[in-house]
Image (cartoon, rainbow, N blue to C red):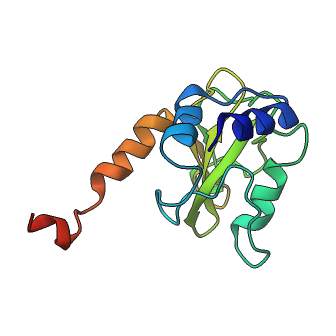
Amino acid sequence: MTEKAIGSFEQRHGVILPVSYRDFLSTVSGGGAGPDYGLPGLAEEVADEEALHDVRAECLQLGFLATPFPHTADRPGPGRGGDADYSVAGTLVLGEIGCGTFSRLVITGTNAGQVWLDDRLWGGLTPGPDFRDWYAVWLGSQEEPEAFQAL
């Protein structure tokens, strides 16, 4: 993505994207290949029939990303003795893992730059690594295409 497009997104939402994610957008990709079902583009609208649609639309509402993410530690969900009523303001959904579980990038607050697992139906909200490390782990897990193995 161009610096102008990234800056426009930041200005519209009143945020500064975490450095590792910003670097990814400007030097690697604005979306596409990534963990689980891939990464939607920064301001990409998701089709209505996709599970990611409503969650992504919420993240892109004005003020949502600029609200500081309130959590600093694990927040157990119903399957771990907690509840599903927790705030995810200040996060951008990076993608769907499946079965109502999502990867969220913390944009604002003390954990900005981390990717958290959001599983409201079972596990709750779990902190994870910095975006760069999260993506690198996925990238390292991919098998080399057969066409390149012969070279």
Residue sitting nearer the eye, 95 or 25:
25
Please identify the quarter of the rendering in which residue 54 is found: bottom right
Residue at 62%, 40% in the rendered image: 105
Q: Say left or right for 5 vs 37.
A: right
Residue sitting nearer the eye, 39 or 78:
39
Q: Residue furthest top?
A: 110
Quadrant where the C terminus is found in the figure: bottom left
Tell me: residue 84, above or below residue 109. below
Q: Say left or right for 1 vs 66.
A: left
Residue at 48%, 60% in the rendered image: 33
Quadrant where the N terminus is found in the figure: top right
Tell me: residue 129, above or below residue 85. above
Residue sitting nearer the eye, 1 or 136:
1
Q: Which residue lies furthest to the left in this view?
A: 150
Coordinates of residue 7 in the picture (x, y in percent):
75, 32
Q: Residue furthest right?
A: 62
Q: Say left or right for 56 vs 144.
A: right
Residue sitting nearer the eye, 128 or 11:
11
Tell me: residue 29, above or below residue 47. above
Residue 128 in sight from this viewpoint: no
Coordinates of residue 41 in the picture (x, y in percent):
65, 55
Coordinates of residue 113 in the picture (x, y in percent):
58, 30
Give the number of marks: 0
Residue 39 in sight from this viewpoint: yes
